[in-house]
Image (cartoon, rainbow, N blue to C red):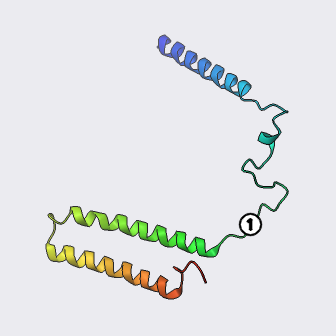
Amino acid sequence: MLLASILTMMILVIAAVVMILSSILAKKTITDREKNSPFECGFDPKGSARLPFSLRFFLIAVIFLIFDVEITLLLPLASIINMTNISTWMFTGIFFLVILLAGLYHEWDQGALEWAD
């Protein structure tokens, strides 16, 4: 019991020393003006930080996420073909694909998939 408490204290002391040393060694100097500025990527820090977000990009990203999730739901169909009834398997797969294609057609019909006007 005494050995475990001594070992715990040693681990805590070593961890504290490492944290203190890393915070001392990682301090930024006053002369490092580029690192202290809010923008390190080359943009002008005097300009507006709030740029309008493209709604078309947002729609494409949401559509990608939806189809990505649906593909991950379709992948197990290939692995369970030997364990299920073939007619049930076909009905489930075709039904899921019809729903997927109907959603794709709806997005295409609404114009959400067009990049340029």
Please name the residue shown 85% across and 33% down the image. 30
Is 73 displayed left or right of 79 in the figure? right
Could you say which is closer to the camera, residue 78 or residue 8? 78
Which quadrant holds residue 97? bottom left
Which quadrant holds residue 55? bottom right
- The picture places residue 82, in percent across and down from the top left corner, at 14, 64
Number of numbered discs present? Answer: 1
Please name the residue shown 60% across and 75% down the image. 56
Amino acid type of the residue tagged 1 in the rendering: Leu
- The picture places residue 107, in percent across and down from the top left corner, at 48, 82
Mark 1 crowdedness (10 Å alpha carbons): few <14, some 14-19, many ≥20: few
Please name the residue that numbered disc 1 is placed on: 51
Is 83 displayed left or right of 60 in the figure? left
Could you say which is closer to the camera, residue 55 or residue 92? 55
Task: Please tell me whether mark 1 sits on a helix, a strand or a loop.
Answer: loop
- The picture places residue 81, in percent across and down from the top left corner, at 18, 66
Extreme residue toward the bottom, this view: 109
Is 45 displayed left or right of 77 in the figure? right
- The picture places residue 38, in percent across and down from the top left corner, at 78, 48
Please name the residue shown 37% across and 81% down the image. 101
Please name the residue shown 22% across and 61% down the image. 79
Q: Quadrant of the C terminus?
A: bottom right
Which quadrant holds residue 15? top right
